[in-house]
Image (cartoon, grey):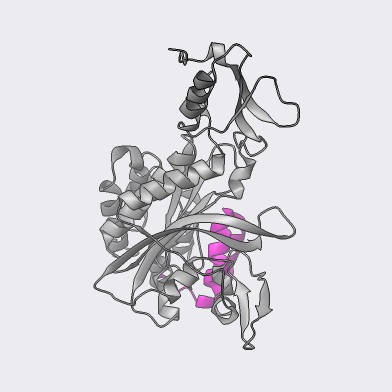
Amino acid sequence: MNTGDLTLNFNESVIFKLRSLFSKCGYSQYKMNKFEEYDLYAKNKDFLISDSIITFTDTNGKLLALKPDVTLSIIKNSKDDINYTQKVYYNENVYRISKGSQGFKEIMQVGLECIGKIDNYSISEVLTLACKSLKAISSECVLDISPLKIITDVFEALSIPSYSQHDILKYISEKNIHELSALCSELELSNENADVLKTFVTTSGTPDDVISSLNKQLKGVIDLNSIKELSDIIDALDEDIKNMIRIDFSVVSDTHYYNNIVFKGFINGVPTSVLTGGQYDKLLNKMKRKSGAIGFAVYLDVLDRLGNNDCNFDVDMVLVYSDNDDIKSINKAVSYYTEKGLSVFASSSIPKEIKYRDIIKLSDCEVDFNA
């Protein structure tokens, strides 16, 4: 019996690992109320995963909402200081419609926010923690990043009208080169400039390959500073973290909120992203703040799709003892396995009313508790 692979609950184990990871890097835990004034979310609905919000009227007549998001609450209650970096993490319940469901759910969300002075180190640190967060969930994982600043630099260089930028981002996210080509014709872009925009559909892969390709394809179009900044951030990462990263421009977000690197994390066995994040200085600007910010969230409701989620079991193991076994030995065995983080049901017979993940006889334990 391999007890090292057993956990009390898969999601609880992930939360514990992430809290430990974040706190070791100097992030302090942030606690918040279950609700905020509805106006905070109403003004930033496009920033939310879902615009469906549970509301109620307080005794003083104010319209409140059960929080569908954590980031907005943290920004609202943080200091606006461009010379100081506030680093916080959270594990909080949010209330929204879960992916693939039709009704509201209470969802545990874990993540971190870095607010204030955001420099290249801050970005590299957050990318590193995002990769390590994925690894804490599964060894088979990848972080897809999109340097949104490069796209917006090209928009400016090609004088792409603002009303067309949203559609272009949509076609890039869909990797829809046919519709992108049609829009380029509609905008009367030259073939050369149209090819520049198509670069964001056709170019993806390892950081080294993509950065090399971008330097060649965008030379003379933009000043390449944004590409160099991306290269500096990537080069500063540890090799094992760098190997987890792919650059894929289809990972795009609303340019009204995000201004630089945006990213999504994927693990084998789950068809959608389990982690999303990015640099969202524009959101803070919209909220009349001078600070910058970058962060990410891990969506634990998505992890329910993993085959190794053990929430269907009442206990990890049943420990079966005989009438001849010493009570002291049984107590030692229960303490031994519970200290390893397992839930144990000790009984002289196999229980019929509970679901268990594994069963072991006291006489077959890896340790001799009678010694």
Numbered-mark total: 0
In percent of width and height, residue 366 lies at 48, 15
Percent position (x, y) of residue 338? 50, 32
Chief secondary structure of the magenta span? helix
Q: Where is residue 334 drawn, in percent x and y?
A: 52, 27
Identity of the residue drawn at 47% across and 13% down? 370
Q: In the image shown, does 78 or 9 lie closer to the viewer?
A: 9
Q: Is residue 186 magenta?
A: yes
Image quadrant in which the C terminus is located = top left
The residue sitting at 30% across, 59% down in the picture is 122
* Residue nearest the viewer, comparing 299 with 286: 299
| Among the 4 quarters of the image, the one containing residue 78 | bottom left
Confirm whether the magenta stretch covers residue 67. no
- Residue 61 in the image: above or below residue 215: below
The span picked out in magenta is 158-187
Q: Nearer the viewer, residue 321 or 323?
A: 323
For this view, does 202 lie left or right of residue 228? right
Which picture quadrant has residue 102?
bottom right
Quadrant assignment, res 321: top right
- Of residues 144 and 222, which is closer to you in this image? 144
Q: Which residue is at 63% across, 39% downward? A: 311
**Residue 2 showing in the rendered view:** no
How far across and how far down the image is residue 333, in percent? 50, 22
Look at 60% across and 56% down and name the residue there: 107
Vertical side of 70 occupied by 214: above or below = above
Q: Is residue 189 left or right of residue 295?
A: right
**Residue 79 can be seen in this image:** yes
